[in-house]
Amino acid sequence: VAGLGVAMAALGTVWHTHAQREKEAELLFVGEQYAQAIASYRRMGPGADRKAPPSLDALLADPRFPNPVRHLRRAYRDPMTGKTEWGLARDEAGGILGVYSLSERAPMKRAGFRRGREGFDEAESYRDWVFLAETPAPAPAGASPGPALNRPRAAKATAVTP
């Protein structure tokens, strides 16, 4: 009975470690999805206006265009807390620059992060894993605003022969 108890305790520890690593991997994926969506929102801003989104809902249906533009397929839950609430890194105008988990737990992963996320290896909690969007390049002079898919297309001249 004692041996079975020790084996069950070891199995529980292994399972807990595996589950936390899976949640970390999911957090890294979801955080990157939000960062890419925020960067897309800013990149597609009309003209030289490259403002950050005012809310996460603006990533699901961008209100700046007449046709629906979706920078994010769906709202993700925070895998560490299980809630859809995220911490938000904001600029001075209140726009969202990035997201982070609200979990106070210490991360297990300490190395091997992708370029641009090197600071994650020094994190004391998941709150320190802030997924900031990359800053968009300024719009080239004379660039037309909005996404290419939603711009009206120029009519092509076609020759009709009788």
Image (tube, rainbow, N blue to C red):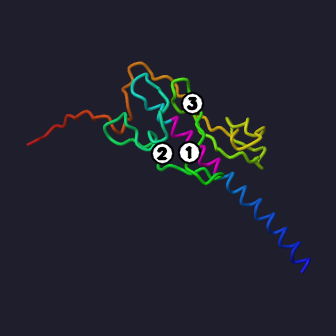
In the image, which residues are magenta? 27-39
Who comes first in sequence, dot 1 or dot 3?
1
Q: Which residue is mark 2?
A: 72
At horizontal 60% and vertical 44% (from top left) the residue drawn is 31
Outermost residue on the right side: it is 2
As rendered, which of 78 and 131 lies closer to the eye?
78
As rendered, which of 71 and 90 lies closer to the eye?
90
What SS does tag 2 mark? Answer: loop
Q: Amino acid at mark 2?
A: Leu
Q: Position of residue 48 (x, y in %)?
A: 43, 22
Q: Position of residue 52 (x, y in %)?
A: 50, 30
Residue 30 lies within the magenta run: yes
Q: Which residue is mark 3?
A: 90
Q: Quadrant of the C terminus?
A: top left
Q: Which residue is mark 1?
A: 33
Q: Dot 3: within a 10 Å radius of its alpha carbon, few (fewer than 14), some, or many (20 or more) residues?
A: some
Q: Are marks 1 and 3 in contact (CB under 8 Å)?
A: no
Q: Are marks 3 and 2 in contact (CB under 8 Å)?
A: no
Real-space CA distance between mark 1 and mark 2, rounded to the nearest whole angstrom: 7 Å
Mark 1, mark 3: which one is toward the viewer? 3
Real-space CA distance between mark 1 and mark 3, rounded to the nearest whole angstrom: 17 Å
Who comes first in sequence, dot 3 or dot 2?
2
What SS does tag 1 mark? Answer: helix
Real-space CA distance between mark 3 and mark 2, rounded to the nearest whole angstrom: 18 Å
At horizontal 73% and vertical 35% (from top left) the residue drawn is 119
Q: Dot 2: within a 10 Å radius of its alpha carbon, few (fewer than 14), some, or many (20 or more) residues?
A: many
The image quarter in which residue 156 lies? top left
Q: Are marks 1 and 2 in contact (CB under 8 Å)?
A: yes
Q: Is residue 133 left or right of residue 110?
A: left
